[in-house]
Image (cartoon, grey):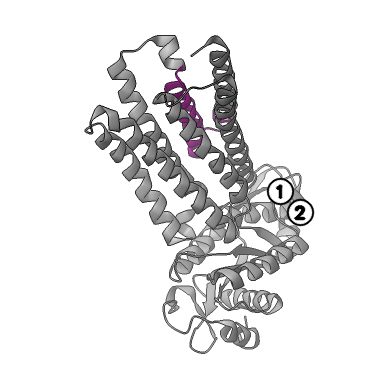
Amino acid sequence: MGTPALVVWSMALGAIAAVALARAGDLALRPERMQLRALAYHLGVFLLVLVESGVLRQAAHPSAERLRVLQVLAGPLCVGFANFWIRGWLAAGERDRLMAAALRASAFVLPAGGIAALALPPGLQLPASALLALAGSGLTCWLTVRAWTIGDRLALPMAAGCLLTLPAIAGLYALAMRLGSWGLAGHAAVAFAAAASNAVTGHVLWRRARRAWRTQEPGGAPALDPVTRVHSAEALVRQLVAAQKRRRRTGREGALLAVTVFAPERIAAQAGPAALDEVWMTLAARIQREAGPVNPVGRYWDRCFVALVETIPARPWLRTLGLRLAAALRQPVEVTGRDGEPVRLRVDFGVGVVLLSRRPAEVEDVLDAAQRLAEAARGLPSRAATADPRDGGAVPLEQARLEAGPPERAAAAAAVAGRAAP
């Protein structure tokens, strides 16, 4: 590697390190698992580029055998770890069984394949490692596009970042195997692909992390800007309409959850209007946290929040989600009272869960059904209700036969609108 190429790769490594340093700063400010995984991902990319590009060979002069082992393992390990991490980032386990299973399997198969490649003849080890890394990256790219088609808007820029990794990995392994003669333009193109992929991925990581931070409860401090916490009614309806259009194409089942709060004037009379605002923000944060950062939550009207889960892995999963949400909302809310002292309040609420079938219903009907189920849930011990698939009547979520009934629930949802009552 000549001096100009070394400069190019040093600049690429510097760009990658800058993103990793920014993520390390976020981790110091917010020590969370999401931040730690993101930092580990960027460090993995840095090490992959350092090992495969030839910079490590120039800087540290490792033995040929040690360098070859590092080059064989770097790609599969880095891509395997990335797939393990992106499974959680996409909330694959809560949205799509195929996506979750493929990412989980690749996270174990790729590192194991990299280790197994060391048993091959020396001349086949790097090609085998390159094939594993490219196959894993191609799988990630396809699955992020799949996530975008089922409603994850951040998955498309993530897919763009994953797409850039394909020429980056191919070029890095070509350099490691010393295939052909490389001019400065070739080094610059591969280095740009590696740095750009890392930058795009880092930006998307940060955007989802920021969304997750916004859903965290303020720990008793008053929320200052409610608009930035959840979607407005208009924005939520637009997202629901768009989700219904996508579901006509994908044929996936989803869910709509409505949370209705009863007698909020009691809270205002007891602790004041400012305390009521704190209650709204705390409830919104809890709903968003249980729904997950990939699913939009909005305030449909002053006493009703709605969460849209565009795709679900299976119908019985709705029982877990609805009961978990009800349990979270049942916890007391700590607010600041009229005299400035903390006050713990319990909220009177109901949760309505509507299955969005493979045959999308009208948005107005689904919203009306969810609200009426939430009203019916007020009188239930679990505070969560859904529609009986047999006749559309409101039943406790913990007793619902979610596995039974026809896949289309539009008729049941319409029946709920007329039958459910508080």
Magenta includes 400? no
The reply to whether residue 262 is visible in this rendering is no
Q: Report whether 201 appears left or right of 143.
A: right
Mark 1 neighbour density, 10 Å: few (under 14) some (14–19) many (20 or more): some
Residue 409 drawn at (x, y percent): 55, 82
Amino acid type of the residue that numbered disc 2 sits on in the rendered structure: Gly
Q: Residue at x 71, y 44 (%)?
A: 222
Residue 70 drawn at (x, y percent): 34, 24
In this figure, which residue is indicated by the disc labeled 2? Answer: 272
In the figure, 77 relative to 333: above or below? above
Q: Quadrant of residue 161?
A: top right
In this figure, which residue is indicated by the disc labeled 1? Answer: 337
The magenta stretch is: 26-54
Q: Report whether 303 appears left or right of 415.
A: right
Which is the main secondary structure of the residues drawn in magenta? Answer: helix
In this view, the residue in front, 121 or 93, is 121
